[in-house]
Image (cartoon, rainbow, N blue to C red):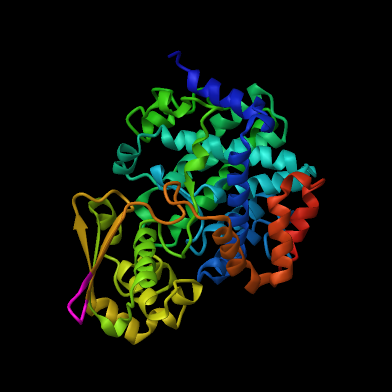
Amino acid sequence: MPDDTLEAALTGFAVEFPLSEVPAGTQTHVKRLLVDGVGCALAGDLADETPWVAAAVSALGDGTSSVIGRSESLSSLGATMLNAYLMTAMTVCDVYRPAHCHITPLVLPPALMAAEKSRATGVDFLEAVVIGMEVTVRIALGLDYPTFRARGWHSPGVVGPFGSAAAIGRLGGFDEATMRNALGLAATQSAGSYLSWGTPAVKFHQARGAASGVLAAEMARQGFPGGQRPLTAPDGGVFNTHSNGGTPDLAMADLGSRWELEQVAVTLWPGASPVQAMLTGIFDLMKSDVVEPGSVSKVEIGISKEDFATHGHFGPPSGTFEALLSYPYLCSAALHDRQVWFEQVERPRYTDPDLLSFASSRITVVPVDDLPVNGCRLEVELKEGRTLERRIESARGTPENPADDEEIRGKFHRCADRRVGEELATEILESLMDIESCPDMAGLAALLRIGS
């Protein structure tokens, strides 16, 4: 393979591939992710740290770019960063599981900013989002994730600048030379480590990754050059510095005919990606059997060794973020409240002594050899003597166990109605699902801003 084959393929794809050749099912999946991302953003004000992020980006200055669910307009950079953080703030946004990377916060905010500014059509916006998402997941796929993760990297800050820059470049009509420069300038900003794991700073990687793409695209637009082999250069290419050379052939295999973005999963409950299988199983058990806290003597949650290493130590939460990561707490909340939604990860629920006592005295989390990453084995011992078991290899919302349209719409309303009311939420949802009919994205951005 010539040295720059991957970069040439991704650049040509980002500049030229038409929406008309994207399968209808793929487009529908992307529109559902748009709905999901906007819904998550409308719930983002609930996170403890959102006011700090809003204050920080406001310091970057005012502007004309809209923020979802808020009245103020910010600079292009500020709006992109805040919208990205809002989408990921409550840990309920989508995830590309092969690289443990949230995708919508990386691509939708910069595309929305650029489309509003250029008054692009909904068709142009959808095309840019499709391109940006596919570029992001293709690069993530080619990283050789186990090696990448072993070196301490966190995907969103590394791959996000590429997808963000590609989406903006597509909306800006970049030619191949300008797009190649934009991707090179994205690479020079690729960073984000697991040093921040266990703190809300890991969610900043999404915001910073999206914003880095804004900078890369704008500098390229002005003629600033970037490295021409951002992924495969032996000295400094992302695949070599962040991994072991990666798998360039895999990253470009069937580009334009097989859509890797279809592997982006929807998250149905607030909580980190690995806990979704546990929640899938516990709610499945409650549907098929009478499982009440008073009837349970013990719950054993088996998870993969990889998930145990990153999540097994989270116990009683001291804040919303830790509540979103804790298997014992979320299991206890599901059994007591028969739901897990935002109320369950907010004060005072995560400080409730009954929930915490149940979580610490009756629930254990153990590593299991034969479970896949993000899988789960549940064993619930009842006081009457029976043991209920479930093995969940794919959480609800994943490509292997997909959410249906009713679940997607229901989640959106649960996120949005509390913020904007049911009537406006429905109008936003239908506008996003029919995005091709939008004549001017500035109008849709104004609709999203009305939520304040």
Name the residue at 27% across, 83% down. 295
* Viewport quadrant of the C terminus: bottom right
Q: What are the residue bounds of the magenta stretch? A: 382-387
* Viewport quadrant of the N terminus: top left
User: In the displayed image of the protein, which residue is found farthest to the front?
Assistant: 288
Q: Is residue 225 visible?
A: no
Name the residue at 79% across, 51% down. 442
How far across and down, in percent of the image, does residue 321 sit? 42, 67
How far across and down, in percent of the image, does residue 275 sit? 36, 61
What is the magenta segment's predominant secondary structure? loop
Name the residue at 38% across, 76% down. 333
How far across and down, in percent of the image, does residue 28 sit? 62, 45
What is the quadrant of residue 126 in the picture? top right
Indicate yes or no whether the magenta region holds residue 279. Answer: no
How far across and down, in percent of the image, does residue 394 sit? 37, 52
In the image, residue 59 above or below residue 253: below
Q: Is residue 190 or residue 38 the one in the foreground?
A: 38
Q: Is residue 413 or residue 320 the one in the foreground?
A: 413
User: In the displayed image of the protein, which residue is found farthest to the top?
Assistant: 2
Total labels drawn? 0
Q: Is residue 12 left or right of residue 422?
A: left
In the image, residue 124 above or below residue 282: above
Indicate yes or no whether the magenta region holds residue 384. Answer: yes
Q: Is residue 389 or residue 340 the one in the foreground?
A: 389
Q: Is residue 374 visible?
A: yes
Q: Is residue 190 left or right of residue 336?
A: right
